[in-house]
Amino acid sequence: MAFFSTSAVMILTFVVFVLATTPSTAHKVTDTEIKHLCSKSSHPARCYELLKSDHRTVNVDAKGLVEVSVDLAAKKANKIHSQLNSFSKATHDSRLRNLYNSCSKNYNDAIRNLEVAKSNLHSGAFKNIHAQVKDASEEIKNCEKVLGEASSDHAHIKKKSQDLEFRLNVVKITSDNLKKN
């Protein structure tokens, strides 16, 4: 009867663990596949450009592409959230300050939804990603409604929100693709 050394057993255990936990989505996503996914968006070229703007897309699988798209949406949401807070502090108009603060809360909730979506991605709860992105989108729409009460949007938050909505749609597209695999 042969006995294995401790290191051999550890290596064998590691290899079995890696093979067992590697998802079926482990093949690299090609440019053609990214273009195909982006063809499902309202602006395919813009979607492709957005995804390719992140250096990680060169070497990601379908799961990694979802993570990239979530990160790109979260980055935009965080930027707008910071701007809303700055605008709120800078204005002397109490009505406008209240509108910015209200929107800031919406963006805070949207950012939290994106964090939960990313957590779901890492835990394998792929079906829940779409729901979190939908909730984030609702928060952004609520902000747009609030800003609709303002006589003007000098900060151009509505336009920035539309860009975030586009990014959230890209997350939906990439996560829907992941659920199919």
Image (cartoon, rainbow, N blue to C red):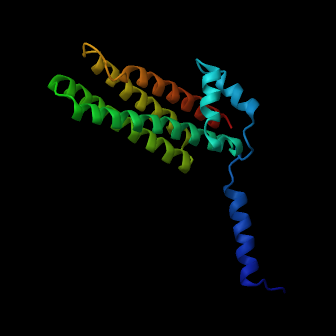
- Residue lying at 63% horizontally and 28% vertically, measured from the top left: 49
- Residue lying at 38% horizontally and 27% vertically, measured from the top left: 140
Which part of the image, by quadrant, shows the N terminus?
A: bottom right
76 relative to 21 in the view: left or right: left
Depth check: give the residue in front, 132 or 72: 72
Which residue, as the protein is rendered here, is positioned at the far right?
Answer: 1
Percent of width and height locating residue 106: 32, 32
72 relative to 9 in the view: left or right: left
- Residue lying at 69% horizontally and 53% vertically, measured from the top left: 22
Percent of width and height locating residue 43: 60, 19
Percent of width and height locating residue 177: 64, 33
| Residue 16 in which image quadrant | bottom right
Which residue, as the protein is rendered here, is positioned at the far top?
Answer: 151
Percent of width and height locating residue 53: 61, 35
| Residue 83 in which image quadrant | top left
91 relative to 165 in the view: left or right: left
32 relative to 117 in the view: left or right: right
Which part of the image, by quadrant, shows the C terminus?
A: top right
128, above or below 45, in the image: below
| Residue 121 in which image quadrant | top right
Give the total number of marks visible in the rendering.
0
- Residue lying at 59% horizontally and 31% vertically, measured from the top left: 50
